[in-house]
Amino acid sequence: MPDLRVSGSHLVDPSGRPVRLRGVGLGGWLNMENFITGYSANESTMRSAVREVLGEERSELFFDRLLTSFFGPEDADLLRDLGMNCVRIPVNYHHFESDDRPFEIIEHGFRHLDRVIGLLGERGIYSVIDLHALPGAQNQHWHSDNPTHIANFWNFRQFQDRAVHLWEAMADRYKDNPWVAGYNPINEPGDVHGRVVGPFYDRLVKAIRAVDPGHVLFLDGNTYSTDFSIFREVYENTVFVCHDYALAGFAHGGPYPGETRGEWVDRSTLEATFEKRTVFQRETGTPIWVGEFGPVYTGKPDVDAQRYQILRDQLEIFDAHSAGWSLWTYKDVGLQGLVTAGEPYIGVFGDFIAKKGRLGADRWGSTMEENTAELRPLHQLMETEFPSWDPYPWGARYQIDDLIRHILIAQALVPEYAEVFRGRSDEELLALADSFALASCARRQPLLDLLNENLH
């Protein structure tokens, strides 16, 4: 039976003892993201391009080895030794169901998820399974494996039916696993009008509960887990999950304390933002869990010292409110991870990653200042001709950047990423994948020390 349940404003174990889940997100693994592993655009587009270069068999050789190397026993040991008791595991529906054969569950797709849940459980670490990419894409960005800026999940009933069916299969598989803390069924929904997401949650909760009445549900609010007005009831045994990225912590963030894009950010504004994003939880007396947060690091010592201070302040705020948390993210190529992939991958793809950075082709690594000479006239044109245009979710400036930098330019870069694989032997492909094994990685020691201090 599941080990955790909601009791008032806390999660508790079978003895009734409160448990505060604190850990890390395993981003870029079963849901790959461009800034985490260094490619461009969205995962399915990238995988298709690599498959064209390597062929089906050798492409699978590389990606399967990457998934194996990315998280193994040594990684689980590191997180345990830091004092973490939870890992949020983002997954892409493509591992478990294909678009050309909808509603057919792919048993083989569970092998890595089962493996990592087992590794973590052996070390006393809970897993939260997070469906990060749903059929049709539940939000407007790359991290839902969306090649466009349209979240079609909310527009087509069949996509919703497929998600319900997948979660019924997931719940049936893990219903008796005590080290699965629960299910996070929709990461960062972006329902533009907010009319579909609430009724869909009603339907999804009933479907999951019919199969697995015991596990905790971790439900994200609309508009990227910031808007909880869409919930029409407080479901039993449920945590309502907020995401709490600090404005000054983004790649385009300014000094801390200081001004970022016209807004002053200091500790008091961090706390005010957190309190605003958790009003629903506090009013309903349900547990507070921050499913994602964390600054982007730049490699500049003075800037990164400020980013560590942002993180330190956020952790102290969470502690004061007895909030659980899941830091984004565990491992990447240098922007946020506790550890950073090593050689030969970083050397082989270094020029590509540098070009991507110069063009500002992934949102998470962009300062919003790349290509200003080329893009400024477009921004000015749109502002002049359409002064009231304020598209969902973040307004005109971000929408233009999404369409030009993070879709158009990013997709144009995909063939260049794939071509780097051309002509490489099987041994070279395996070595590239093994660059993500912990033994090959560099550790972001100030971040590890900060977390270790907080968790102990």
Image (tube, rainbow, N blue to C red):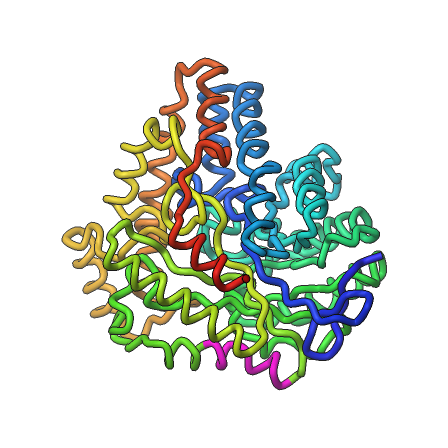
Q: Which residue is drawn at 63% across and 71% down?
A: 240
Does the magenta segment cover residue 278?
yes
| Quadrant of the rendering where the C terminus is positioned | bottom right
Residues drawn in magenta = 274-283
Measured from the top left, where is residue 303 in percent x and y? 26, 59
Q: Which residue is drawn at 66% across and 41% down?
A: 116
Q: Which residue is drawn at 43% across and 81% down?
A: 272
Does the magenta segment cover residue 76?
no
Quadrant in which residue 381 is drawn: bottom left
The reply, left or right, for residue 373 in relation to residue 180 is: left
The reply, left or right, for residue 107 in relation to residue 406 is: right
Q: Main secondary structure of the magenta part?
A: helix
Seen in the picture, residue 18 relative to 32 is either above or below; the reply is below
| Quadrant of the rendering where the N terminus is positioned | bottom right
- The front one of 428 and 417 is 428
The reply, left or right, for residue 182 in relation to residue 84 is: right
- The front one of 408 and 40 is 40
Measured from the top left, where is residue 426 in percent x and y? 49, 15
The reply, left or right, for residue 110 in relation to residue 136 is: right
Q: Residue at x 45, y 30 (%)?
A: 435
- The front one of 48 and 356 is 356
Measured from the top left, where is residue 105 in percent x and y? 74, 40
